[in-house]
Image (tube, helix red, strand yellow):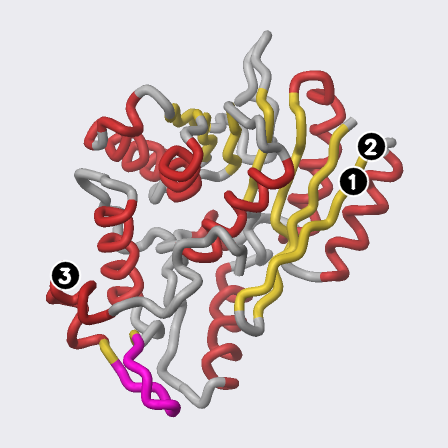
Amino acid sequence: MHEKNRYRDQHDFSALCALEPELRPFLTVTPDDRVSLDFSHPRAVYLLNRTLLLRDYKLKHWDIPAENLTPPIPGRLDYIHALHDLCPDTKRVLDIGTGASLIYPILGVGEYGWSFVGSEINATSVKVARALIQFNPSLRRRVEVRQQPDPSRIFDGIIVDGESFDLIMCNPPFFDSREAATLAARKKWEKLGRSDGGLAFGGADRELWTVGGEPSFLRTMIEESATYASRVGWFTTLVSKRGYLKQALAHLEQRQASEVKEIRLAQGNKQMRILAWRY
């Protein structure tokens, strides 16, 4: 985990339960006798996230529909800190697929005072994200959400004439179908000795999957990025698998990106890969 991540240490669940008593039934004891949370329950993850965001980012309100993705905050925060390391002078960021949770803008505003445009294809998620902005004064002058009119495009239809960004960030949909996402979650819980775990972080369909899966999404992102080369400092995205990264690097070579970086961060046994490029 990034050295600046405020969640590097174990959560104080007693303190969190004092703020949100509904968390208490989801507490569990690990084999090494630590108090933790049963992360297999989407409701538990949602309550933890809401409590952390209200406490640590001084939000007045945070809520999302039950079917939407509840993002794990420590991992999202690592991406924000890694981008600050990449481009310390960042002021303006485009978040592709910002989602109903608006998580990256909330963290980026709270940690570094960045301004954000968030793009989103789902009309309900756009409505919820815009409501979060209105409910929270800290976000009103720093965050804007735009609906992508064409689900097959990424930057086209979002970046307007004369507009520029220091950074673009993206957490792409990893799967090519809802069934693939569900199967991956089931296999994860089976490895942990659980047969009852589901999509613990939830997720509306287009948050989890897209036609062609992540490789197709990355290919489109790279192809479109060349068109906006003079108006964006760094293009960045998470990449879930080494094989996908290899394909993306080949596409970037074809597009003649002037600089390409792979940034790795570890969270326990999980590796985070960030692909960054500029022209």
Residue indicated by mark 2? 257
Question: Residue 147, image x and y in percent?
Answer: 43, 27
| Amino acid bearing label 2 | Ala
Which span of residues is magenta-colored? 28-36
The residue that mark 1 highlights is 260
In-front residue for pair 198/162: 162
Q: What SS does tag 1 mark?
A: strand
Tell me where residue 98 appears, x and y as whole percent. 44, 38
Left/right placement of residue 234 relative to residue 115 reads right
Above or below 163: residue 237: below
Q: Which label sits on residue 20?
A: 3
Mark 2 and 1 residues: CB-CB less than 8 Å, in contact?
yes
> Which tag is nearer the camera, tag 2 or tag 3?
3
Q: Is residue 269 magenta?
A: no
Q: Is residue 113 above or below residue 209?
A: above
- Which disc, if any, is residue 111? none
The reply, left or right, for residue 80 in relation to residue 132 is right
- Check disc 3: other Cα within 10 Å, few if <14, some if 14-19, many if 20+: some
Residue displayed at 85% across by 46% down: 250
The quadrant where residue 71 appears: bottom left
**Mark 2 or 3, nearer chain start:** 3
**Which type of secondary structure does the marked residue at label 3 adopt?**
loop
**Marks 2/3: CA distance?**
48 Å
Amino acid type at circle 1 is Val
The residue positioned 30% from the left and 71% from the top of the image is 41
Task: Report crowding for label 2: few under 14, some 14 to 19, many 20 or more residues within 10 A (C-alpha).
Answer: some
State the image coordinates of residue 50 (x, y, percent, origin top left). 25, 53
